[in-house]
Structures are given as C-alpha cells and as structure tokens.
Amino acid sequence: MFPALETELKQQTLPDPYEDFMYHHLQYYGYFKGPTCLSSTVHRQIEAVNRDSLMLSSPLLKSRQLLHDDLGEVNARPREPRDLFAFFSSSEPLQAPRWPIECEVIKENIHHIEWVPPQPEYFYQPTGNEKLPEIVGEEKGTVVYQLDSVPSEDSYFTSSRVGGKRGIIKELAVTLQGPEDNTLLFESRFESGNLQKAVRVNTYEYELTLRTDLYTNKHTQWFYFRVQNTRKDVTYRFTIVNLLKPKSLYTIGMKPLMYSQLDASTHSIGWRREGDEIRYYRNNTDDGQQPFYCLTWTIQFPHDQDTCFFAHFYPYTYTDLQCFLLSVANSPVQSQFCKLRTLCRSLAGNTIYLLTITNPARTPQEAAAKKAVVLTARVHPGESNGSWIMKGFLDFILSNSPDAQLLRDIFIFKVVPMLNPDGVIVGNYRCSLAGRDLNRHYKTILKESFPCIWHTRNMIKRLLEEREVLLYCDFHGHSRKNNIFLYGCNNNDRKFWLHERVFPLMLSKNAPDKFSFHSCNFKVQKCKEGTGRVVMWRMGILNSYTMESTFGGSTLGNKRDTHFTPEDLKSLGYHVCDTLLDFCDPDRTKFMQCLAELKELLQQEIHKKFNELGQDMDLEGSWSDISLSDIESSTSGSDSSLSDGLPVHLLNTADELNQKKKMYKKKRRKPLQSRKQRNKQYQKSNLMQESKLTEDAPEGAGFASTLQKQPAFFKNSENTSSSMMKNEKPRLNELNGRDKGTSLGPSKMTTLILTKNKERMQREKPGFTVSCSPKRNTNPSQEPAPDTKPNWSRNRYPATKGGRTTAVVYPSLHIYTYP
C-alpha cells in the first residue's frame, strides 16, 4: 500500500554486523536474552502497519519504545526494560548454579518429593538410658569419606564456575570389596550438601564431621548428606562430633530427618522424622580450643540396598526456587501481576531475584496511594524453614483467592525469596562466600563484597522515597526455641506507643497453635545494629521484624509436642497475608482491642518485675511512662552471632571508601559567606537549646522525686508530671480519638481504595462479598484449613456511614500505572 515504507522496512531487516556479533557474543556467555537480529522486531512493526497503516508514519516505526494496543493504536509509554540477564523460558534449561572453583560437585541431580505425614510426628521422649558414645576418631577408626580441600578462614573467595572445580570428580567413598561388604557409602558434594568426613568406628557405627562455612572456621549446624549400601533390620548409630552450640532443640525432643528413595518411588513417602536414643552432649576431647558438642542417634533403615538422605531440616535449594519461579514466569495469569527482575548478582554470579507483586492500578492516583510490603528470606542459608514460609506466602498471594486479589489491589509486595544463594548452594549454615554473616552487615558500604545486602537496602531506600512501607519482615530459622515468633523494634514515639506489637499479637490470634506472642521480643541491642530489622527500622519502617521459625515444632494448642512439617510452615505464609488484612482493616475495632490487650500485658509484666525485686508501687498513673526496653530481656537467646568485622582483605577497601565519603561530604559543605549568616546560625542554635531546656526542666523534677527510690530500669518521661492520670479511661479515650484521624493504620486514601475495591468486586463477581466470614474463601484448594480463630468480628470492609465518602486529594506525583 505504501511502497516507500515497505522499501524502508526491507532495508531495516538487514542486521548491523556489529550488533549481530554482540548479540551472539552476549548470548554465548548467557548475559542476553533476545533475538540475534532485528528481523522479529521489524516483523512485528510490519504487522502493526498492515493493521492500521494510515495511523503510522515511518519515523514512528524506528522507535522501539512505542507499544501498540489490540486495536493497533500507538500507546506512547515506555516498553518494559529488556532482561539484561537470561531469565526463564519454557524452551530453555534452568540456570545452573555457580560454585567456587575449589568445590567438587557430582553430576547427579538430587530431587525429593513433597509429602505430608498422615499422623503427627511427636517429639522424642528421652528414657534416661541413652548411650553416650566415646569419641574414637580416625586414629582408631577407618575414614570412609573425606573432602580433599575445604577453603578455611585463611583463604577467601576468588572465582566461580558452573560445576565447581575443573577436572575429573574423584570417588571419595571407599570401594566395596564384594556384595557382603556392608560399609555405608557417603556423599555430600551436591547442592546444599554438608558433610566433611565420615569415620567407621564399629561395624554399624559412624562418627561424622561437618564442614564449617566456607572461608571460616565455625558455624557447624546444618547437615545434609546421602548414604548408600544400607542393610535392613540393623541398628546403625551416627554421631556428629563437631557442633558448636551449647544448647540445641535436640535436647528437648527434636529428631533428625530421613528420606528413603525406595519409599519415595514405591510408596510416595518423603522426608520423615526418625531416630532413637537421641542425645546432645559436650565432646570430652578437649584440644584447648573452643568446645565441641555431639549429636548422636540410632536408626534402622527400611530397605536393603537403599539410598537414604539425612538432614537437619527439610532442604530447599536454589534449584527448587528457580523451578518455582519458572512456573510463575510461564503462567499466563500469574505473570500479569508478578514481575520477576534481577536484583543483582551474588559474589559467585548467581542471580538474586526480586519479585514485584501487585494488581495493575487503574489510575496513577490509585497506584500512588498503594503502600508497600517488603519480605525477604534465606539471608542465613542453613535456615531453610524461611524458604518454606516464603513459599506458602507466594502460593497464596499469587492465587485467585478473593483475599489475595484484595491484597494485590491495596499493596505492592517487594519479595526477595533468597538473599544468599551462594551460601545455599555450597551448604553453608550462616555465611556468604565473603565468610561473614550478612545479617550483621546491612549498613555496609562495600557494594561488591556484599552485593545482595547493599542492593536490598538500596531498593528499600528508593521505595521509601516513593511511598510508605507498611511492613518489612525477614524470614529466619531458630535452633534453640520451639514455635514461631517475631523480633521487632520498640518505638520511642509516644504517638505510636505499642503499635509495633499489634501485628505480632494479631498473628498469634490467627495461628494460635504455631505462633507464640510471649516469645516475641522488641528490644534493640547494640550488637544487632547491623541486622535487617534494625537498619530498616532506623530508615523509617515502624513495623520492621525478623520472623524466627523453629527447626523443631510446636508447644501450643492442638500441635503441642509435634514437629513442624513444610505444610505447617507454608500455612504460616498464608496467615501472614490474613493478618495483613486484619491489621489494615478500615474498621479499627481489632486494632484497638489489641492495643488494650497489650497495655494489660505490659502492666502484668511491670508488676512481675516489681515482685521479683520485692517492691511495691502504685502504677495507676505513671506505668505507661516506663521504658519498654528496660522491662524486656535481651534477645541473646536468639540464634545470633556477633559480627566478626570485615575480612582482612577487605579492610583497606572499606577504609578507602570511607575516606572518599568523608572527602565528598567536605566538598559539599558550604562555608558561611557573611557575618550576617553566621549571626543567624548562632541565634538559631541558641534558640533551640533554650526551648529544649524550657521543655525538659519543669517536667523532669516531679517524676524524679516519685521514683528516686525505685529500680534503675524506670526512666523519666518528658510529660510525666503534667500527664499523670488517675485511671486508664482517659488514655483509652485518647487512643479512640486518635483513631478518628489518620495517625493509626492506613490513610484515608487506602480506606477509599478498600471500599471501591469491594464495590468493584461485587459488581464483577455477583456471588462474592468482601465482607466475609472466617472462612472467606470457599475454595479449599486456595488456602490452608483455618486454625482456631479468635472470637472477633471479621467484617473488615463496612459500608461508609450515611452513604458519604470523604473527599480525597490525590498527591500530585507522576507514577506509572504499574509500579
């Protein structure tokens, strides 16, 4: 129809030689996903011209940034950025994990089926007759498996490659002498595996040594290994001899996990808790260094000539994550509201994924009104329970459940499902390939050494500049406490007093047989300043948490004295979503109920402290002015590790960056140009000091005289003497009055969105109402069976009173419809 245009397009189909070379070059190394020439792009442009050639002209055809809608009209908005790194495709294999070049890796692919035990798996009950085997060592035993070279703290990571160490993979296990040889064959050189040495000390007894985290000399906790050549109806004993923690859940009934390949293939039975005569005790072989602890257990294998695995907890590998993300990327429905991006590359070059989950907004104003929720997991690679909670959350939020759709309407979810893929791949328990605990380095300036932490913090910083981040939560595991609980940060702002405790209390009501509010702690310690929750809290996120889920099980409700399964942990991911809806309910009844309950709990805790000290005090008017941090104990009982500082090879780099930062700040500082400016600055500082003294002086004295003989953990408050109250009713009235404003919970904008979403969903789905009962989703396949729920109203989204809505002024921000 237009010969000139057709000629121009034919000329464009000839690829540029340089571009064609670069595309092939980048594709060869896996850094570009796209066509090797421009013919497919031009082909799409020709089709657009044929659809509506009168509406287009040749200059428009040259732009790759213009998109066409279904009618062929030009939509002048930026195209989504191309994938710089090769992402998933149904026609391409998954990205193979990259290993440090020192690591030998076997070629077999290890895969386990998911399985839910039909009966609860109870804790082991000690009999008192458990044997404590004496540690023999390789001097009196026979080494049947040993890794050749393990990078220690004296070395550091240099490079990586797919498949790890070059060359032929050695057979580390012993060679069997014949069919009657009953020696077990050990192996751990696979993804997330950890076992350094196995010594046979008796016919059916083995001593095992775990590998420390790479480039360190500590953190032995996670184990995951394979045994072959088993014998049925024979009692074997395994003893791990180099654990480092003096306390463990194994002392109170936790059992190891075992997986039989024959059972999996014939009966579809997966991981299960097994073991007898379980003891956790101190190793008596004292070599003058740090003490070691031993874990011993006995077991009978179910089959002859079986292949079995043992693990500290249910493994969840980097490949497992990629398989899940592949299914999301290939889903035509889920990929519409879940965008997968590369946050960064790890030290070894493995991709760290960032998921953005939200329903596309209808207007820019609606997009600007959405609040954000940030969730991360696996900063500690050996805490695989965090991945199972994350999987449960993603399964639900990506489903077609009405509650999931509502959450996607009102929130933008930023999810980093695996922060430390390098550590997960090599089988570390706590550290990255930098040899350091990443959850102590969130304040780092070393972008190249701690890329995942630096980029996560930077992503959240940019997000805070765009919108409010309602909640940040980092999923972890805990090896010394049962149940699931949160660590948060006490808020010093009296306007939001106790608000950081409302979400954990609501979660304990929604999952009463798994989540323990009494195990939660909100004290901010100096040694935790580099953790994710404290850094994000100091950046301005009030509800900033670390979620700790046990390696063991529950001591609560119907699940008392039973081990957690992956389904239990995945159900908690659903309960996080459920609690978010309760927390942001425009009807603030539940929120206020929780605040009142928190005040009662706090009063009880204060009286308990006084009783311990043998003192009495009338706290009718002043109890709410006590420092919360002084009441709570520290979180030293958590699975914390003190920061080891930077590795030696990074100290000079950090010093140079700090010097550059200081020089940059000095250059930016503007000198005072005149005496008038100097005088103005001096007067301003004097005025601020005087006003501060005026505020502090009269109020401190009154309360100080009241408490001068009281314990040291009570502190003076700024407004105590002037705000002493005879009873609690004025404070409750004050909180109820505050509820009418915008300081509590979501803004009026979010309330309006909730109401509009209800109306829109009712119009589009006549059979569905947003105000629903405890079982809001009638389809049982979309969410786990609900647990015992608190007796509170579930009417979340009431209609506006009087049929009127508050007029809303939208912020004048230009934000794309899809964040």
Image (cartoon, rainbow, N blue to C red):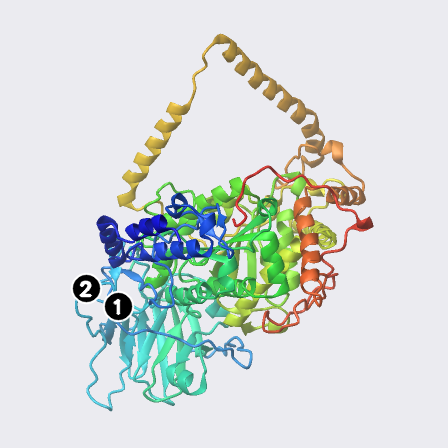
Which image quadrant for residue 200? bottom left
Task: Give the farthest residue toward the left.
Answer: 167
Percent position of residue 35, x then y: 31, 57
Instruction: Tell me if residue 368 comes above or below residue 26 in the rendering.
Output: above
- Number of the label disc, if any, that sits on residue 166: 2
Judge by depth and name the residue closer to the eye, 812 or 636: 812
Secondary structure state at the residue bearing disc 1: loop
Amino acid type for the residue under numbered disc 1:
Val
At 53% from the left edge and 11% from the top edge, which residue is drawn? 679
Instruction: Mark 2: give few (<14), some (14-19) or many (20+) Cα within 10 Å.
Output: few
Can residue 516 be seen from the camera position used here?
no
Q: Mark 1 near mark 2, Cβ–Cβ under 8 Å?
A: no
Residue highlighted by disc 1: 105
Percent position of residue 119, x then y: 55, 81
Instruction: Tell me if residue 552 comes above or below residue 435 in the rendering.
Output: below
Judge by depth and name the residue closer to the eye, 307 or 616: 307
Q: CA distance from mark 1 to mark 2?
A: 10 Å
Amino acid type for the residue under numbered disc 2:
Arg
